[in-house]
Image (spheres, rainbow, N blue to C red):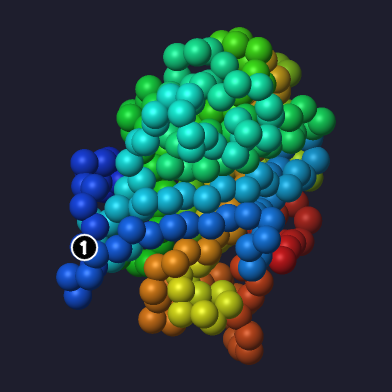
C-alpha cells in the first residue's frame, strides 16, 4: 500500500497538537461514532486473503482534540485495569488489564473498540501504544478535502505475545488500492493476492461530508494493506476495509472528496463506497 510521504509528514506533525480550537474560538471535545446502529453501520472488512467479507466491529472515539477545524488528535488515555475499559475487554470477559494479552502493550482507552470476530475467531481489536504514534490516533485534512487518518493498531487473540498482530493503520476518505501479498512482492511462492472477493489492484474510494443531512460531519474511510509476515494467521495476505463514521462535529453541508462518476452522468450522488476492479479484471463494482 502506498503511503504518500507528504500525508504522513503532515499527520506526524499533528502528534503533539492536543488543544482544541475552532476558527470561531469555541472549545470543543468531539466524538466519532462507528457502530452497527450508525446511519451507515460500522462497515465491512475484506480478507485477509481468501477470508470472505466480515462486518466490522463498532468503535466510539471520545475526547478528540483539534489543532484546526478538520485536523485532530485523540491522545493516549490509559488507566490500567480501572474503568473505563474498552468494549472488547468487556465483551470477551475475564479481568480487564488495559493492555493486550502480552501484558505490556497499553491500549488507548479513548478509542472504545469492540471485539472483532474474524473467520470464526473472536479477538480484541485496539489502538495501541508502543509504535510511532505513541498510542495516539491522528487525522488531518489535505487541501483537496481528503482526510487521512493514521494510528498503530492491533488484533489480539488472547493467547499472549504470539497471538498479537500489530499493524500500522493508514485510512483515507480518498482512494486506496488492494496490494498483492507480501510473498508476491518479495518474489516467493505461497501468497494470496486478494482480499476476500476483491483481487489485488482493486481500488476503494471513500468520502467526507454529511450523508444524512443533520449538519454534522460524517464519512467513509477506506484502508488497504497487508498482515505482517510474522502473523500467526494469513501472514503477508492483503486486507481491505471501509469504515463508516458519524461525529458530533458541526458541518456546513459542503461535500468533500465526493465519489467520481462516469463522464456526463448527472443526478444523485453515487453510493458512499465505490469499488473499482483492476483494469484487466471484470467491470467495476459499486457497493452501498
Where residue 134 sits: x, y (%)?
A: 33, 30
Residue 127 position (above or below residue 145): above
Where residue 233 sits: x, y (%)?
A: 70, 20
On the image, which quarter does residue 137 sit in? top left
- In the picture of the structure, the residue carrying the numbered disc 1 is 21
User: Could you say which is closer to the camera, residue 275 or residue 126?
Assistant: 126
- The structure residue drawn at horizontal position 53% and vertical position 57%, both measured from the top left corner, is 33
User: Could you say which is closer to the camera, residue 70 or residue 77?
Assistant: 77
User: Could you say which is closer to the camera, residue 47 or residue 112?
Assistant: 112
Where residue 221 sits: x, y (%)?
A: 53, 55
- The structure residue drawn at horizontal position 35% and vertical position 36%, both measured from the top left corner, is 76
Residue 215 position (above or below residue 176): below
Relative side of 72 to 184, left or right = left
Relative side of 45 to 4, left or right = right
Relative side of 126 to 28, left or right = right
Residue 83 position (above or below residue 95): below
Residue located farthest toward the bottom when viewing the structure as drawn: 267
Amino acid at each position: 500500500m502506498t503511503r504518500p510521504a507528504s500525508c504522513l509528514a503532515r499527520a506526524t506533525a499533528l502528534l503533539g497538537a492536543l488543544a482544541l480550537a475552532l476558527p470561531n474560538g469555541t472549545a470543543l471535545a468531539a466524538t466519532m461514532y462507528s457502530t452497527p446502529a450508525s446511519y451507515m453501520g460500522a462497515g465491512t472488512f475484506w480478507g485477509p486473503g481468501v477470508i470472505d467479507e466480515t462486518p466490522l466491529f463498532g468503535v466510539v472515539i471520545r475526547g478528540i482534540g483539534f489543532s484546526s477545524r478538520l485536523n485532530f488528535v485523540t491522545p493516549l488515555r490509559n488507566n490500567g485495569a480501572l474503568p473505563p475499559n474498552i468494549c472488547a475487554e468487556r465483551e470477551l470477559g475475564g479481568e480487564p488489564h488495559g493492555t493486550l494479552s502480552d501484558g505490556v502493550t497499553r491500549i488507548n482507552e479513548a478509542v472504545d473498540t469492540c471485539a472483532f470476530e474474524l473467520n470464526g475467531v473472536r479477538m480484541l481489536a485496539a489502538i495501541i501504544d508502543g509504535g510511532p504514534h505513541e498510542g495516539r490516533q491522528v487525522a488531518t485534512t489535505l487541501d483537496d478535502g481528503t482526510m487521512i487518518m493514521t494510528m498503530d493498531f492491533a488484533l489480539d487473540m488472547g493467547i499472549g505475545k504470539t497471538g498479537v498482530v500489530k499493524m500500522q493503520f493508514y485510512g483515507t476518505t480518498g482512494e486506496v488500492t488492494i496490494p498483492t501479498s507480501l510473498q508476491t512482492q518479495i518474489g516467493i511462492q505461497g501468497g494470496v493476492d486478494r482480499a476476500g472477493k476483491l483481487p489485488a489492484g482493486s481500488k476503494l474510494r471513500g468520502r467526507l461530508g454529511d450523508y444524512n443531512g443533520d449538519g454534522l460531519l460524517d464519512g467513509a474511510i477506506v484502508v488497504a494493506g497487508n498482515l505482517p509476515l510474522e502473523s500467526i494467521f494469513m501472514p503477508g495476505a492483503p486486507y481491505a476495509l471501509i469504515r463508516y463514521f458519524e461525529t458530533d462535529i458541526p458541518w456546513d453541508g459542503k461535500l468533500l472528496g465526493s465519489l467520481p462518476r462516469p463522464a456526463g452522468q448527472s443526478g444523485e450522488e453515487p453510493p458512499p463506497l465505490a469499488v473499482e476492479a483492476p483494469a484487466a479484471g471484470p467491470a467495476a463494482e459499486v457497493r452501498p
